[in-house]
Amino acid sequence: MSAPGPALRVLVVDDEDLARARLVTLLADCAAPSARVTGQAGNAPQAMALLQHQVFDLLLLDIRMPGADGLALARALVDVAQPPALVFVTAYAEHAVQAFELEAVDYLTKPVRRERLQQALQKVERALQQRQAERANAVSEDVLLIQDRKRSLRLALAEVLYFKAELKYVTVRTATHSYILDASLNALEERYALQFLRVHRNALAARHAMRALEKHLDPVEGDSWSLQLDGLDERLPVSRRQLALVRDVLAGRA
């Protein structure tokens, strides 16, 4: 019999102390997989601060909270380098469609039973295993399959200069063409982490194509930065959070 895997690292986010305490108690009784709470937050800003500095396998997230709600926090996960699997825990069933549009693994309604929580943990474990397998295959997967109008196109990954999120789709840009890809930016970031770097919340840039950072002075809006890529006149915006990483790539340190 195989040994049990490590416990899932869980961040519990709920504005009610009793609700968080109940989840902590229920998680302590779960097994196969087991889980341990390594972070708690009472609102979205507290949760985001934890997500920027700690790695979690699972985010158990309430929806209705003062200020930014759980749906807003879920959308902000695109700014997290290693986003956790997402499970909503709420007293309101009407948000389920929005939750699954945000790629939630599961949706639990309060009061949560231990058996139902255990099922959610099993779904999360499978999702994380699939994510890990996709990462393992990323090095050998050097071709994208693009559905271009009525034809399927095999595009070499080495030709791609950037991926950019546009509404529900992703723009794939080469030196000469733009294509539309039905995929999520998060999934592309995980699959091609060795070849591409997130430079902005909505853009991944090819590491090999990065050439220069440009600073734009604006006394009203504040200074901003953009990235020059090989073979393109347009520039990609660079967020302040990613500025150091982009500099490291340009300097050959990452």
Image (cartoon, rainbow, N blue to C red):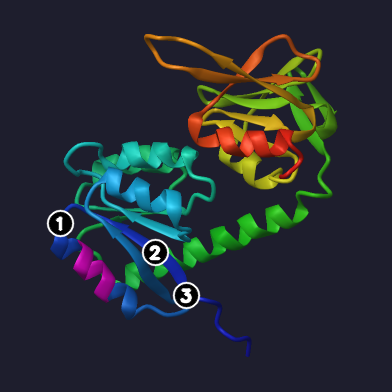
Q: CA distance from mark 3 to mark 2?
A: 9 Å
Q: Earlier in the sequence, mark 2 or mark 1?
A: 2
Q: Which residue is mark 1?
A: 16
Q: Which residue is mark 3?
A: 7
Marks 3/1: CA–CA distance: 25 Å
Horizontal arrangement in the rendering, residue 237 relative to residue 79 (left or right) = right
The answer to which of 43 and 113 lies nearer the viewer is 43
Q: Is residue 231 above or below residue 242?
A: above
Residue 76 visible within the image: yes
**Crowding near the residue tagged with mark 3, few <14, some 14–19, many ≥20 C-alpha atoms within 10 Å:** some
Q: How many marks?
A: 3
**SS at badge 2:** strand
Residue nearer the viewer, 166 or 247: 247
- Verify whether residue 101 appears in magenta: no
Q: Secondary structure at mark 3?
A: loop
- Mark positioned earlier in the residue sequence (3 or 1): 3
Q: Quadrant of residue 148?
A: top right
Taking 37 as reference, is 160 above or below it?
above
In the image, taking residue 135 as reference, residue 186 lies left or right, namely left
Residue at mark 2: 10
Foreground pick, 221 / 186? 221
Q: Position of residue 45 (x, y in %)?
A: 29, 43
Q: Which portion, as a residue range, is magenta?
A: 20-25
Q: Residues within 10 Å of mark 2 (few under 14, many from 20)?
A: many
Pick the quarter of the image with the C terminus: top right
